[in-house]
Image (cartoon, rainbow, N blue to C red):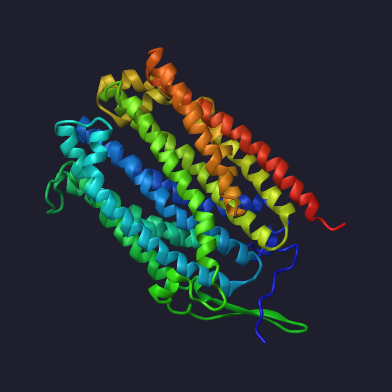
Amino acid sequence: MATDVSIKPDELITLPPALRASPARAVFTLALPILGEQLLVFMIGFFDIWLSGQVSLEATNALGAALYVSWLASLMVGTVGIGAHAMVANRWGAGRFQDAQLVARRAMIWAALVGITCTGLGYLLSGTYAWSIGMRGDDLTITTRYLRLASLCFAFQSITLCGAAIMRATGNMKIPLLVQAGIFVLNMPASYCLVYGLGGMPALGVDGIVIGTVFAQACGGIAMASLLNFGPTSITRARHVRSDADNSHTEFGPIQPLTAYEKVVDGHDADHKNINRDLLRLGLPVLGEGISTWSGHLIFIGLVKSLGSATFAAHIIAMEVEGISYLLAVAWGRSAATLVGQSIGAGRRDLASKFGLYACLQVCVIAAVTSLIFYFGSGQIFHLMHKSPEVWDVGIPAMKLLAAYQFQLGVLIVLNQAAQGAGETRIPFFSSLFGIYLIRLPVAYFLGIHLQMGLIGIWLGMICDITIRCLFMIFYWIFRISRREIRSKPA
């Protein structure tokens, strides 16, 4: 009789045997492919910012506005992916492969629905958003058109993000990396050729940047959906585990076809009625965190925008460059989330605690390097990224300040994602809500606007927020995870 079987207490099912005894090496090994993926994402954004800087200041401002909209969309579509990741990782760690497959199928359909919704809302509200952040005249026209084109990415991006989260939950980090590499290869040459009219393509200026992005993201979403449903991957091939008196093994075969829309949405599965409910339970706090974070940043960039176009452009460039630090931390956070989720599924909270600790230690090494780069390389970075001396004068001294909080930012990202991998999505939501609205925005307004400290004062509000939230998550991780570990040990 076919039944699910858990893995042995000292084993993690996705790790090679040589790595099972070393949590530090396990975190590092799983993080490397994600790091490659995140660097590709960063290089695409970096290239787009650079390309817009060669076109005009208005192009940079339009792209900057679009970055915040794309960020909101990724937060919304990531709601499904984070919930699916926690559920798939837990079931995979426990050897419940069929349950993991069912979660994956339903999550992908939800992701498609959310992505299509984001595309529609993004297209309809582009003009309102551009006006709300202070765009007027030509800036308003260019930004609105750019945002409407950019919104076409969201449906495909939703599939890519959710599929990647499911793959990572099983320990398969290579497929998301390969898909992102394909997007990278397509995006940069397509955008460049469309901006300048090379290779027989029309010269579209700033519109060419976003059209190249839409083309690449569409190809990526189609590739991810195909690989997840039909490719030779662990989630599509593992069918079930048989348990006999002396033997256990996994059989492989193609994943069953996607269930009908009505079954998925209504949850009419005889054995798994609670999957939709659990996806919502885990995903809704993530959605709340995303919306509150984005709306807080909307107010935040409004403060920056009030200081003038040059200051806004300097802020966008600095945030895009700092994105490399953010994305590096995300790589270690996603590695920790996968290992923590599988450890809890396997009944090993002691390993979950260790994975979180080693991920934080390793990300601190990265933070030390990026801090030095931001402090000593700010001048070279701004001279490379923009041709306006006015932007250099504002951005170069302010960017040195970014070195002051890279450690806090890295640890906060890792512990937030590790907690989400453990199925705890509420704590990151509440800490984000508190930090942004009660610390970041009031301090940024008081220092940057009231005391007229400019961009430096506004960024000091951001640093205070990140530092306090980091300390909170450290205490939460130590006291909650450690105490659960002690209670879970056999007497």
Q: Quadrant of residue 384?
A: top left
In the image, taking residue 310 as reference, residue 262 lies left or right, namely right
> Which residue ends up furthest to the right in the rendered image?
491
Name which residue lies at 44% across and 45% down.
290
The answer to whether residue 168 is seen in the rendering is: no
Instruction: Give the residue at x 34% y 46%.
Output: 70
- Residue 247, visible in the rendered structure: yes
Residue 347 placed where, x, y %? 72, 61
Task: Please give the name of the residue rendered at 41% of the width and 51% of the height, measured from the top-left corner.
Answer: 76
Measured as percent of width and height from the top left, residue 84 is found at 51, 61
Quarter of the image where one finds residue 143: top left
Quick check: 110 above or below 301?
Answer: below
Quarter occupied by the N terminus: bottom right
Q: Nearer the viewer, residue 157 or 372?
A: 157
Quarter containing the C terminus = bottom right
Where is residue 200? Give x, y as percent: 12, 54
From the viewer's side, name the closer residue of 64 and 191. Answer: 64
Q: In this rendering, would 230 be left or right of 424? A: left
Q: Quadrant of residue 17?
A: bottom right
Tell me where residue 258 appears, x and y as whole percent: 42, 75
